[in-house]
């Protein structure tokens, strides 16, 4: 098992790639903390992990709320006594364009997509440094490299995640390794909310692999970055996108 006895917080794990990662981490021996706002789905994920013989708990968190992020780390420490892995995966999508995005929506995007990742890292880093070892994985996007018409808040926050990842790697090393995953089109509820995989046909046809990704395609990369197999990989933004735009 690649994560035996490790404690992993996976934010946004009530659904999509976070859920697939929580399930895979548990299968690899980690004690997993599942988070999100939806208690029914959080419980479902934890029950599923336990039914497979794994160990997990959930903490209901609105990532835009500072106090919820603090409670998440406090409850993890209380239950499992440490944190080895933090996967900052929770994220929200906004399709608003530059002239339309309200400041309220803009600030919410920053709070959920960026500030929560920074604050959780601040909260877990002292414990990881004390242990002499830890891993943080952030979720960027292919939208963290390029821009298109619309999506200005989403694009901006994902660009910010790339800078945050590199800053974290510099400031939290040598004990803590920090990398980011930049997914391409992955079939999750987020994609369904904008019309399903068909609206991403261009991304599918424009890639050598000619398919939309599945949550497990991200989970397996997260496992690689969380495990010692990637022990010399640091500060990288790893595109997992079927090869679009190569
Ligand atoms: N799908 C793609 O093609 C794609 C591409 C590039 C990047 N990404 C990124 O990948 C990450 C995961 O997205 P996904 O595609 O797996 O979407 P998803 O299935 O919709 O999952 C999103 C997760 O984030 C949680 N979340 C959203 N807003 C939250 C909030 N305010 N507080 C706490 N949790 C919140 C959701 O939990 P609750 O609903 O329970 O709150 C859910 O567990 C995101 O950062 C997204 O930006 C996705």
Image (cartoon, grey):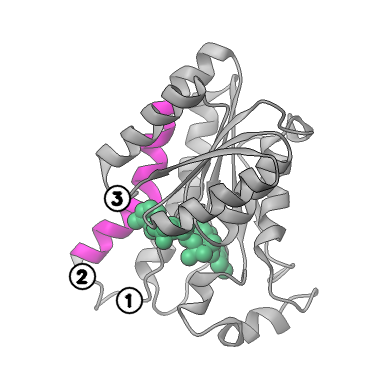
Which circle's residue, 2 or 1, is located before the other in the chain? 1
- Residue at image position (73%, 51%) is 220
Neighbour class for label 1 at 10 Å: few (<14), some, many (≥20)?
Answer: some
- Is 61 on the left-hand or right-hand side of 28? left
Q: Is mark 1 within 8 Å of ligand 1?
A: no
Question: Is 29 above or below relative to 114?
Answer: above
Residue at the image position 45 percent from the left and 78 percent from the top: 193
**Numbered label attached to residue 64:** 3
User: Counting residues from the N terminus, which is met first, the one under dot 1 or under dot 3?
Assistant: 3
- Coordinates of residue 227 in the picture (x, y in percent): 72, 34
As drawn, the label of residue 76 is none
Image coords of residue 1 (percent x, y):
79, 33
Q: Which residue is mark 1?
A: 96
Residue 120 within the segment the image draws in magenta? yes
214 to 76, vertically: above or below = below
Q: Secondary structure at mark 3?
A: loop
Q: Quadrant of residue 73?
A: top left
- Give the numbered dot on residue 102: 2
Q: Residue furthest front?
A: 51
Residue that lies at the very extreme toward the left in this rendered image: 103
In percent of the image, x 63 and y 55: which residue is there?
Answer: 20
Residue at screen point 34% across, 45% down:
115
Cα distance between the residues tagged 1 and 3: 19 Å
Stretch in magenta: 104-124
């Amino acid at each position: 098992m690649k994560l035996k006895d490790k404690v992993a917080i996976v934010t946004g794990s009530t659904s999509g790639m976070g859920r697939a990662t929580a399930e895979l981490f548990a299968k690899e021996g980690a004690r997993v903390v599942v988070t999100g706002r939806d208690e029914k789905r959080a419980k479902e994920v934890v029950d599923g992990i336990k039914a497979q013989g794994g160990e997990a708990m959930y903490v209901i968190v609105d990532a835009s709320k500072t106090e919820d992020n603090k409670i998440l780390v406090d409850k993890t420490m209380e239950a499992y006594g440490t944190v080895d892995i933090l996967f900052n995966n929770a994220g929200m999508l906004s399709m608003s364009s530059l002239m339309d995005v309200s400041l309220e929506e803009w600030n919410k995007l920053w709070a959920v997509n960026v500030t929560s990742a920074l604050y959780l890292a601040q909260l877990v880093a002292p414990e990881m440094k004390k242990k002499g070892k830890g891993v943080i994985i952030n979720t960027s996007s292919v939208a963290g490299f390029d821009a298109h018409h619309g999506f200005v808040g989403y694009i901006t926050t994902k660009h910010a995640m790339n800078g945050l990842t590199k800053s974290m790697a510099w400031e939290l090393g040598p004990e803590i390794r920090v990398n980011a995953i930049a997914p391409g089109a992955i079939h999750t509820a987020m994609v369904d909310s904008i019309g399903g995989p068909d609206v991403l046909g261009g991304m599918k046809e424009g890639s050598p692999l000619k398919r939309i990704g599945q949550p497990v395609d991200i989970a397996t990369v997260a496992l690689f970055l969380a495990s010692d197999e990637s022990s010399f990989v640091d500060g990288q933004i790893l595109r997992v996108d079927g090869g679009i735009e190569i």
